[in-house]
Image: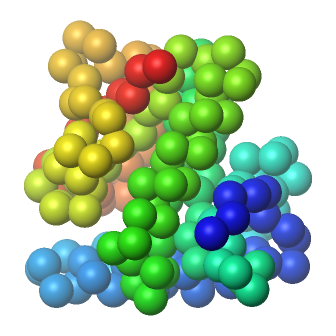
Amino acid sequence: MINRLARRDELPVLRDIERAAGECFRAIGMPEIADDEPPSLPELTHYQRAGRCWVVADDGDWPVAYGLTDPVDGRLHVEQVSVHPDAARRGVGRGLIDHLAERAEAEGLPGVTLTTFADVPWNAPYYARRCGFRVLADAEVTPGLREIRRREAEIGLDRWPRVCMLRER
């Protein structure tokens, strides 16, 4: 598997990956997440042009996972990580997270943050157990992460418990 920046012509594929990855939420009683639209092509184009849209490509150079990042409060923030179900459970997502952490370190950033569902097995428990993240205490949540959580609440993601997480160097 190859970690690399996404190419513009691949952006529609990333939307397909997001839709396929979202289907697993249906099985755990979160159909609203499964039905949520992926980032739009203009949004993905913004990330791609900024050099903040990463893919994991298979041996045929076809994207099977992707991640979007933003600078937030002096850290690299993982806005989105999605792995196509056909590539799941093979370390693809963990490899992408590790790659993003390496990018943060190369940029001199002290860590990587993300927000995620607290109780979904492949979200917060996975990031803590397999990827080196820890849940931030409320006092540790930075202004930028509070703003992200506010926007998440506005679109209804707070129907399920969510947390902010940090992976330090």
Find residue 88 and report its horizontal and vertical position in percent.
39, 77
Left or right relative to 132: residue 27: left
Judge left or right: residue 165 versus residue 111: left
Splitting the image into 4 quarters, where does residue 108 fall? top right
Image label count: 0
The relative height of residue 50 versus residue 104 in the rendered view (above or below) is below
Residue 99 in the image: state x and y as whole percent: 59, 45
Is 8 located above or below residue 106 in the figure?
below
Give the quarter of the figure containing the N terminus. bottom right
Q: Residue at x 37, y 49 (%)?
A: 152
126 on left or right of 4: left
Q: Is residue 133 left or right of residue 145?
A: left
Identity of the residue furthest to the top in this view: 139
Q: Measuring 81% from the left and 47% from the top, which residue is drawn there?
A: 51
Q: Nearer the viewer, residue 8 or 103?
A: 103
Asked if one can make out residue 131 in the rendered structure from this viewpoint, the answer is: yes
Which residue: 23% across, 41% down? 128
Q: Residue at x 47, y 19 (%)?
A: 169
Q: Can residue 43 be seen from the camera position used here?
A: no
Colour scheme in the image?
A: rainbow
When the figure is inspected, residue 125 is found, relative to residue 141, above or below; the finding is below
Say which quarter of the image contains residue 85.
bottom left
Q: List x then y, in percent, for residue 44.
A: 72, 63
Where does the image place residue 49, in percent across and percent down from the top left?
A: 87, 53
